[in-house]
Amino acid sequence: MKTYKELSEMLGSLYDLDDMSHFYDDSKVEGSSKTSRKQIAGAMKKIPWEKGESNFDVGGGKFNLSTKQLATYGVTNFIYDPYNRGKAHNKIALRMSDECKTSTIMNVLNVIPELRVRLDVIRQAKRARTEEIYISVYEGKKTGVGGQTRDGWQNHRELIEYLPEVKKIYPQAKIWKYGMIRVLI
């Protein structure tokens, strides 16, 4: 698999990992850009990555910190986020995703109030060669009562509450160590 630098050079300005500003499209969902934080989901550092593999990062946001972090493990990360990336970027990510061994949905389901939309996101994680899917959520206040925050919507639900939703698509899903849901395909 390509390194971060090789990927950036290969795709040139169309996929410049250091300057993705021309790919952002915050007009799709009002307030969606506020939920995209400039940080690496802690769960990304706990997955047993294998050098040379690639990951499809569903809802990965507008920042490339996870892509850069995974590159240090020898893993290529393709972020797909229709709310924070433009069509050209997402088209490349979808094209490359069919070669990905893993998919991740990190801190995404917790900012989506509608069940139907959460199920669509969960479905997107399965690609042609996917063997494993890892899902984490920010649990917030853990009250189960969703509402607006300074950055947008937050469900305030515990991880275990998302498991039945994931099992609707992937019945074999289980709560995995490190506070994640893991699906083995």
Image: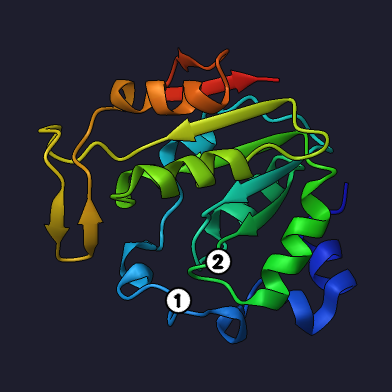
Q: Secondary structure at mark 2?
A: loop
Q: Amino acid at mark 1?
A: Lys
Decide: few, some or many residues near mark 1? Use Cα within 10 Å; few <14, some 14-19, many ≥20. few
Residue 179 in sight in this render: no
16 to the left or right of 46? right
Protein image colouring = rainbow
In terms of image quadrants, where is residue 8? bottom right
Residue depicted at x 53% and y 55%: 60
The residue wearing badge 2 is 82
Q: Position of residue 116 (x, y in %)?
A: 42, 45
The residue wearing badge 1 is 28
Q: Amino acid at mark 2?
A: Pro
Residue depicted at x 61% and y 78%: 20
Q: Position of residue 113 (x, y in %)?
A: 28, 50
Decide: few, some or many residues near mark 2? Use Cα within 10 Å; few <14, some 14-19, many ≥20. many
- Residue 29 lies, with reference to residue 42, above or below; the image says below
Q: Quadrant of the C terminus?
A: top right
In this view, the residue in front, 74 or 140, is 140
Residue 118 in sight in this render: yes
- Residue 14 lies, with reference to residue 1, above or below; the image says below
Q: Secondary structure at mark 1?
A: loop
For the residues bearing labels 1 and 2, Cβ distance under 8 angstroms: yes
Residue depicted at x 48% and y 68%: 83
- Residue 89 lies, with reference to residue 74, above or below; the image says below
- Which numbered circle lies on residue 124? none
Q: Position of residue 98 (x, y in %)?
A: 82, 45
In terms of image quadrants, where is residue 180? top left
140 to the left or right of 39? left
Q: Position of residue 21 (x, y in %)?
A: 56, 83
| Alpha carbon separation for disc pair 1 and 2 | 8 Å
Q: If you read the primary sequence from the N terminus, does the residue marked by circle 1 or circle 2 appear first? A: 1
